Image (cartoon, rainbow, N blue to C red):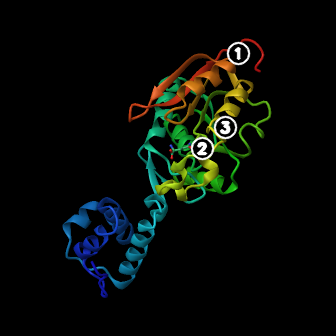
């Protein structure tokens, strides 16, 4: 379908876009340009775009056609029912990562004043959500990317979550601080994984995705160091790749964790593994 010269109406714009990208994406992008609800988009197919709206919509469709993720194009993605600002400095929050929230709430929902650490916070999705779901908790979020931390801080401010932010590489800036709960969605994709060169992930920060030849480098570092930063009885939960559950349970065993378990994501894949630090013996 040729590109109309003059700005078309909503139906015409969507019709033009659907020949290029998925219609669900086209609707989200048009709502972003028009700043309107899905209901308004559906109710007024004959409403005409103005020239500025049409130019902006065309440009977004072309960028989407070239592969840019919708979340970056509109600057936002929902996580656990709340809107998080996102940009190329941070990984786009995935629905599967909500499993980490559910596990945290299942283990600590009835324990006020929990000290929680989120490692590699990125957009802040985990830290901000935990701070809002557990208002008496004391939440610290770490990232080694200054740009990511700025995004996370902006999300905490916008969503009115109280979180302490630390710039640093995993535990390196935390001194001897100990927590009752540590959560992490670290990079865990194998460096040579063809998945990194396909689709939306091409536009996401490689440092948030890839972690050594098997994708286990960061998971291993966190498992090994976590005992020095957990209170006796505290838990570590880490998200990992679809085929890494057994390896991560092995890392947790080597580090001296107890009650080691893996939990399945929405697709039925073991996606999070964790364990409890009982504080017996010296952390290795
Ligand atoms: N699940 C993400 C992906 O496969 C990876 C997230 C991560 O490395 N933490 O794209």
Residue at the extreme bottom of the image, as rendered: 5
Q: Position of residue 283 (x, y in %)?
A: 76, 20
> Which residue corresponds to mark 1?
279
Mark yes or no: residue 1 visible: yes
Does the residue tagged 1 have its C-beta within 8 Å of any atom of ligand 1? Answer: no
Side (left or right) of 61 relative to 223: left
Q: Nearer the viewer, residue 99 or 104?
A: 99
Residue at 62% across / 37% down in the picture? 214
Mark yes or no: residue 110 visible: no
88 vs 111: above or below: below
Give the distance between the C-alpha atoms of the residues marked 2 and 1, in whole angstroms.
Answer: 29 Å
Q: Position of residue 205 (x, y in %)?
A: 60, 54
Q: Quadrant of the N terminus?
A: bottom left
Residue at 68% across / 20% down in the picture? 254
Whichever of labels 3 and 2 marks the residue nearer the N terminus, that label is 2
Residue 162 numbered tag: 2
């Amino acid at each position: 379908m040729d590109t109309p010269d003059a700005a078309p109406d909503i139906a015409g714009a969507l019709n033009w876009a659907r020949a290029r990208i998925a219609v669900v994406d086209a609707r989200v992008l048009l709502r972003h340009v028009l700043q309107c609800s899905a209901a308004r988009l559906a109710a007024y197919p004959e409403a005409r775009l103005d020239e500025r709206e049409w130019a902006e919509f065309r440009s977004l469709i072309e960028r989407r056609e070239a592969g840019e993720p919708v979340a970056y194009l509109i600057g936002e993605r929902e996580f656990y029912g709340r809107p998080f600002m996102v940009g190329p400095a941070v990984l786009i929050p995935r629905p599967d990562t909500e499993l980490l929230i559910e596990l945290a709430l299942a283990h600590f929902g009835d324990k006020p004043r929990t000290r929680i650490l989120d490692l590699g916070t990125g957009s802040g999705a985990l830290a901000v959500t935990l701070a809002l779901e557990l208002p008496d908790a004391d939440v610290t979020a770490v990232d080694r990317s200054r740009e990511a931390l700025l995004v996370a801080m902006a999300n905490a401010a916008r969503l009115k979550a109280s979180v302490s932010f630390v710039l640093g590489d995993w535990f390196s800036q935390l001194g001897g601080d100990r927590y009752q709960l540590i959560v992490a969605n670290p990079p865990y994709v194998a460096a040579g994984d063809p998945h990194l060169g396909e689709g939306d992930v091409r536009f996401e920060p490689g440092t948030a995705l890839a972690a050594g030849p098997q994708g286990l480098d960061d998971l291993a570092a966190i498992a090994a160091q976590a005992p020095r930063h957990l209170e006796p009885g505290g838990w570590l939960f880490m998200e990992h790749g679809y085929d890494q559950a057994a390896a991560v349970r092995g890392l947790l065993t080597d580090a001296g964790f107890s009650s080691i378990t893996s939990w399945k994501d929405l697709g039925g894949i073991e996606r999070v593994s964790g364990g409890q630090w009982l504080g017996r013996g010296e952390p290795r």
